[in-house]
Image: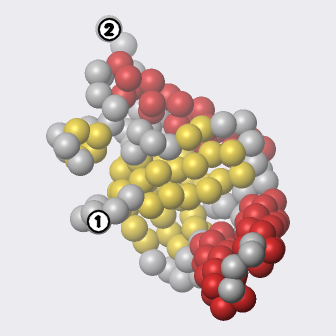
């Protein structure tokens, strides 16, 4: 009987996504414009528009600022390590809520010891085409392994590898 070849960890270096920045800016600008057009007191409309603008600035900072990922290591066992542009590295596990699509992938993951999950928005312009394809294949393969084991990858808040 032959032993299975181990699948290596996928090491990726994401670029800043101009599409993601444009989509976030357009969505927040449109929302602020709609809020300003509502028949409410100007202070309410202005305050809501400022809150939306701040939310947009935070989203853009997470996409292109110092909190944006500089490198990702993803394993078929669902482990992930994210190194941010400011040099901090966090390790954790991918959750079953992640979405893998042709042009859009969202990684939902929980850092080790954290209570709340985090998300990474990855559009097709974030990586070279071959790297993006390899990431999508690895994530789908990892999801198939979780489905074959009869678990979604999360049991009582713990990753399947720790449950």
Residue 6's x, y, as percent?
41, 32
Position of residue 149 in the picture relative to residue 63 (left or right): left
Query: Label 2 belongs to which residue?
Result: 1
Is tag 1's residue or tag 2's residue first in the polypeptide sequence? 2
Q: Is residue 163 above or below residue 91?
A: above
Position of residue 17 in the picture relative to residue 63 (left or right): right
Total number of numbered discs in the rendering: 2
Tell me the element at label 2.
loop
Verify CB contact (< 8 Å) between mark 1 and mark 2: no
Q: Is residue 39 above or below residue 73?
A: below
Q: Residue at x 57, y 64 (%)?
A: 71
Q: Residue at x 74, y 68 (%)?
A: 31
Residue 25's x, y, as percent?
78, 71
Residue 93's x, y, as percent?
36, 50
Residue 154: assigned label: none
Q: Nearer the viewer, residue 105 or 90?
A: 105
Q: Residue at x 41, y 39 (%)?
A: 96
């Amino acid at each position: 009987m032959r032993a299975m070849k181990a699948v290596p960890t996928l090491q990726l270096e994401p670029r800043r996504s101009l599409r993601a920045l444009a989509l976030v800016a357009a969505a927040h600008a449109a929302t602020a414009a709609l809020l300003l057009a509502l028949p409410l007191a100007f202070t309410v409309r202005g305050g809501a528009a400022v809150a939306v603008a701040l939310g947009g600035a935070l989203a853009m900072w997470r996409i292109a600022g110092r909190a944006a990922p500089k490198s990702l290591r993803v394993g078929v066992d669902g482990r992930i390590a994210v190194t941010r542009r400011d040099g901090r590295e966090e390790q954790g596990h991918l959750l079953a809520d992640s979405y893998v699509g042709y042009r859009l992938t969202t990684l939902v993951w929980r850092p080790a010891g954290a209570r709340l999950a985090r998300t990474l928005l990855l559009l097709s312009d974030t990586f070279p085409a071959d790297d993006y394809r390899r990431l999508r294949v690895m994530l789908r393969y990892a999801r198939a392994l979780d489905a074959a084991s009869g678990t979604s990858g999360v049991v009582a808040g713990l990753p399947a590898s720790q449950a």
